[in-house]
Amino acid sequence: MKYWNGEGQYQDLFNKHFKSLVPESGRADTAEGNALRAIARINHDVFNNGAGNIVRETEETDDDGEYYTVYEIERWWEEYFDDIEDYSRLDVDRLKRKIIEYVQYDKDYGLSDLIDDYIDHIVLRVDNEMERYALLLKMPVTK
């Protein structure tokens, strides 16, 4: 929740890379930009909307006529989770379970810390890759 409050451990790096890699709308041109976009969108929806856009709640009945609720990640959010997993190899299934628990039980259960950790990981990887790329641009071309 620290990034939601603007107080993340690498907040300045997050802001810098988000501004340079993530377009105002739509998908980014790079895997780095899409990973930042995805975790930022998830972070925003969890803490601004109680993950109400991410998790679908469906009422169903069992064979005895008893009602129960099924909690699932909305299909169109899968792209965001895929972008995170493809770029970072972080355990998005764990993140999905925590988000569903957050909605189902109305308790954090470590979700805010997990999202902050995922943002930290992604931001540091992006920063490392951007530094490496900048160094490569400065290297002389050899023939």
Image: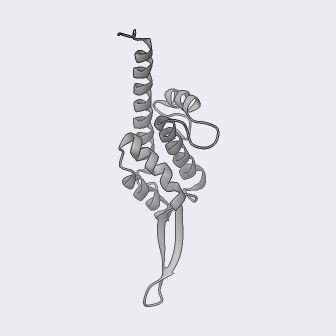
In this rendering, does residue 25 appear at all?
yes
Name the spot of residue 125 as percent of width and height, x first: 40, 31
Q: Residue at x 55, y 49 (%)?
A: 47
Q: Quadrant of residue 121?
A: top left
Q: As rendered, which of 112 and 38 lies closer to the eye?
A: 38
Q: As rendered, which of 30 and 122 lies closer to the eye?
A: 30
Question: Which residue, as the protein is rendered here, is positioned at the far right?
Answer: 24
Q: As rendered, which of 72 and 136 lies closer to the eye?
A: 136
Q: Is residue 116 above or below residue 58?
A: above
Q: Residue at x 58, y 30 (%)?
A: 19
Question: Which residue, as the protein is rendered here, is positioned at the far front?
Answer: 143
Quarter of the C terminus within the rendering? top left
Q: As rendered, which of 138 and 13 lies closer to the eye?
A: 138
Q: Residue at x 55, y 41 (%)?
A: 4
Name the spot of residue 11 as percent of width and height, x first: 51, 31
Name the spot of residue 82 as percent of width and height, x first: 44, 50
Q: How is the image coloured?
A: one colour
Q: Is residue 53 above or below residue 71?
A: above
Q: Is residue 126 above or below residue 57?
A: above
Q: Is residue 12 left or right of residue 127?
A: right
Name the spot of residue 61 as percent of width and height, x first: 48, 84
Q: Residue at x 57, y 42 (%)?
A: 27
Q: Quadrant of residue 118?
A: top left
In this rendering, does residue 112 appear at all?
no
Q: Is residue 23 above or below residue 143?
A: below
Number of marks: 0
